[in-house]
Amino acid sequence: MRFRLILGVNRHAFGSRLPINYQYEQSAAIYRILSSADESYAKWLHDNGFQLESGKIFKLFTYSRFKIDEYRVLRDEERLQILSDTVEWQISFLPEKSTEKFIQGIFRDKVFEIGDTKSVVQFIVRSVEVMSEPDYSEKMVFATMSPICLKFHRPDGRTDYLSPSDVRAPFLLFNGLFDKYKLFYGKDCPYAISECQLKVLDEPKSVLIKIKAGMPEETRVRGFMCKLEMETPVELMRLMYEGGVGVLNSQGFGCLKVVE
């Protein structure tokens, strides 16, 4: 289930400059908002089977970068200055039971901040809209709303971040989707790699993202923005659209939109 949030930019609070790398801060904001409704959050997780007895919480959601109509890039400062009065943010959840009421209720009129030690922007949720599902088919074209991250772990312990055009990418992408299927449905995926095809329709643009930028635990992750044609069973297509593609979806990677 996907939601479109329209966020008002409150310049009077802290200004209108965002860090260029703000994806991790988006994730932190989502968790703060979700967990602020303690009882409702616990019930939502329980209803959807997303909390194990160990207390581990499944993270089957993804989100877009902010859609900002007018902005200025301040490269020397590694900032984005928001010139628009509002921005759009899409957040997509795989859970279904009670999700619409729960998400709309806890996000409505919420005030939150996103930023780092250098600059912060305060946002006010102006509206929360449930987006209609696309017409799923076995062959669809998507464009990335946040970078796709595909990790290949080498035998020597190092990690390669693969472009979707890499020959190894389809195997990683679809196997990750099979794992997501097993996690979501609690059973092995009945489909095979041979039923799935990936075609990259343009030159993937490499994006280096800092996670926890400026902190001792800062890490750098590479993702890719591009347009893709996917061929896969409809059940997997829906999982990919609602839960994201690739890895690190709950940290702002792999959010897709349908291209007609």
Image (cartoon, rainbow, N blue to C red):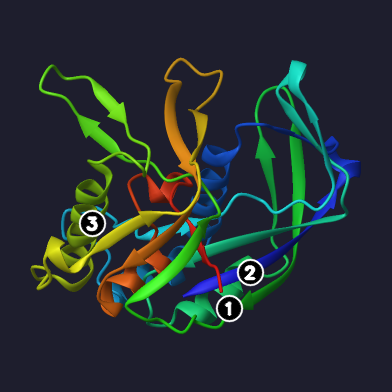
The residue lying at 31 percent from left, 39 percent from top is: 166
- Point out the tag, 1 or 3, that comes first from the N-terminus: 1
Expressed as whole percent of the image width and height from the top left, the position of residue 174 reads 23, 56
Numbered disc 2: secondary structure: strand
- Mark 3 or 2, closer to the camera: 3
- Mark 1 or 3, closer to the camera: 3
The residue lying at 43 percent from left, 51 percent from top is: 254
Q: Is residue 135 above or below residue 119?
A: below
- As drawn, the residue found furthest toward the right would be 12
Numbered disc 3: secondary structure: helix
The residue lying at 36 percent from left, 56 percent from top is: 199
- Point out the tag, 3 or 2, that comes first from the N-terminus: 2
Expressed as whole percent of the image width and height from the top left, the position of residue 202 reads 50, 48
**Badge 2 vs badge 1, beta-carbon distance below 8 Å:** yes
Quarter of the figure with residue 81: top right
Residue bearing the label numbered 1:
131
Residue bearing the label numbered 2:
4
**In the image, 217: left or right of 54?**
right
